[in-house]
């Protein structure tokens, strides 16, 4: 009897200890991943366009997917202002490109099944081709009302070269598979509104990392002011101002975009708005604003641009190649000496991640989960 009781007690202890050890191991492993090479602070990770490595980018699916991951700090998206409708209503929508054609035509394949580049219009219903998805018309989201943009399907099928003369001209690009889903889930992908995105961030307690795309800058200061006020109003409606970070190149990528840094200036102007809710939210967003700096455009020295932003007391969001190059560590140190935050994008390589952590980075934007 005694032996039996001891055996039962041992089994009982095992039943408690083994799950506990597994749980501790998972937590410890995650701690190593999130603070690799650094024991002083945890790095904040934002998922680029939502969980875009598994779901269609910048859709409610990708935002929800990112929101369900406990270790994720923020969900990044890109916004555009739609055109006024008859009621003067011009809400924001989420899309990386000013025309979502790339998203609807990104699964082109040649006759051998290899992924091809963008080779022209191929749509499951060419006779009803939506102008919004057509790159040859120059149609932009900013030219269309919300009703013209909202709920337009982002097609996930793929096109290829026709080899069968009985179904059309050989060599034409046709729909090979209208059901193909490269993202692993079923569902209709559509352009979401900014408020839908904010609501998902709030429901999952995630930072909303909001990029104002440079293409918006070409419409000048009046447009920039309208966009900023609309963004503030929608953030206030969702009540998520304390959990939003605005990022932008602010016209610095394209020299023809004037005035320079319109969104930073318009946020600053909005801080003096007589409406208390506008002023309060603008101040929150202004103090958390991050200036994007990219090394791919040669019109100015990106490292010098980042230093200028720090001198202007702006947090910076810097292309990883700039930070990993000579002088990146000094830039991060200089920003920290000025009590500013440094983010890096888009960090998908684990070695890049670890090297940035060694440089004492604060935040990273990524497409992947390690």
Image (spheres, rainbow, N blue to C red):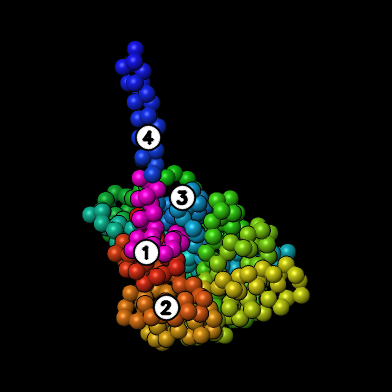
Mark nearest the camera among 3 and 4 is: 4
Mark 1, Cα crowd under 10 Å, few <14 / some 14-19 / many 20+, is some
State the residue position of label 2: 333
Mark 3 Cα shell of 10 Å, populated few (<14), some (14-19), many (≥20)? few
Q: Which residues are magenta?
A: 25-48
Q: Position of residue 91 (x, y in %)?
A: 64, 63
252 lies left or right of 296? right
Q: Nearer the viewer, residue 37 or 156?
A: 37
- Mark 4 vs 1, N-terminal side: 4
Badge 1 marks a residue whose secondary structure is loop
Q: Relative to 16, is 191 on the left or the right? A: right
Mark closer to the observer (4, 1): 4
Element assignment for label 4: helix
Can residue 168 be spotted in the picture?
A: yes
Q: Report the Cα–Cα distance between label 4 and label 1.
A: 30 Å
Element at label 3:
loop
Find residue 271 and report its horizontal and vertical position in percent.
68, 76
Can residue 181 be seen from the camera position used here? no
């Amino acid at each position: 009897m005694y032996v039996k009781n001891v055996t039962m007690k041992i089994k009982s202890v095992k039943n408690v200890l083994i799950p506990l050890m597994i749980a501790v191991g998972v937590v410890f492993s995650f701690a190593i991943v999130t603070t690799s090479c650094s024991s002083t602070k945890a790095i904040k990770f934002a998922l680029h366009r939502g969980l875009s490595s598994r779901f269609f980018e910048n859709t409610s699916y990708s935002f929800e997917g990112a929101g369900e991951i406990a270790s994720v700090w923020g969900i990044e998206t890109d916004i555009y202002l739609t055109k006024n409708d008859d009621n003067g209503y011009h809400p924001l929508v989420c899309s990386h490109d000013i025309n979502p054609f790339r998203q609807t035509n990104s699964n082109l394949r040649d006759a051998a099944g290899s992924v091809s580049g963008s080779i022209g219009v191929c749509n499951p219903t060419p006779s009803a081709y939506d102008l919004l998805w057509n790159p040859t018309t120059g149609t932009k989201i900013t030219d269309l009302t919300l009703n013209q943009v909202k709920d337009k399907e982002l097609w996930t099928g793929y096109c290829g070269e026709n080899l069968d003369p009985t179904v059309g001209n050989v060599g034409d690009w046709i729909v090979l598979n209208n059901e193909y889903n490269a993202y692993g889930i079923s569902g209709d992908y559509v352009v979401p509104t900014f408020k839908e995105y904010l609501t998902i961030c709030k429901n999952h307690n995630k930072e909303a990392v909001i990029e104002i795309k440079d293409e918006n800058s070409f419409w000048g200061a009046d447009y920039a002011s309208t966009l900023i006020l609309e963004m503030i109003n929608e953030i206030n409606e969702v009540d998520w101002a304390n959990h939003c970070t605005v990022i932008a190149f602010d016209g610095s990528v394209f020299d023809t975009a004037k005035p320079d840094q319109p969104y930073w200036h318009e946020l600053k102007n909005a801080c003096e708005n007589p409406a208390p809710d506008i002023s309060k939210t603008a101040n929150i967003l202004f103090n958390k604003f991050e200036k994007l700096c990219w090394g791919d455009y040669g019109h100015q020295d990106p490292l010098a641009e980042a230093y200028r932003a720090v001198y202007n007391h702006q947090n910076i969001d810097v292309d990883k190649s700039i930070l990993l190059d000579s002088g990146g560590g000094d830039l991060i140190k200089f920003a920290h000496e000025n009590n500013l935050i440094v983010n890096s994008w888009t960090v998908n390589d684990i070695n890049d991640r670890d090297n940035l952590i060694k440089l004492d980075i604060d935040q990273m934007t990524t497409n992947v989960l390690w």
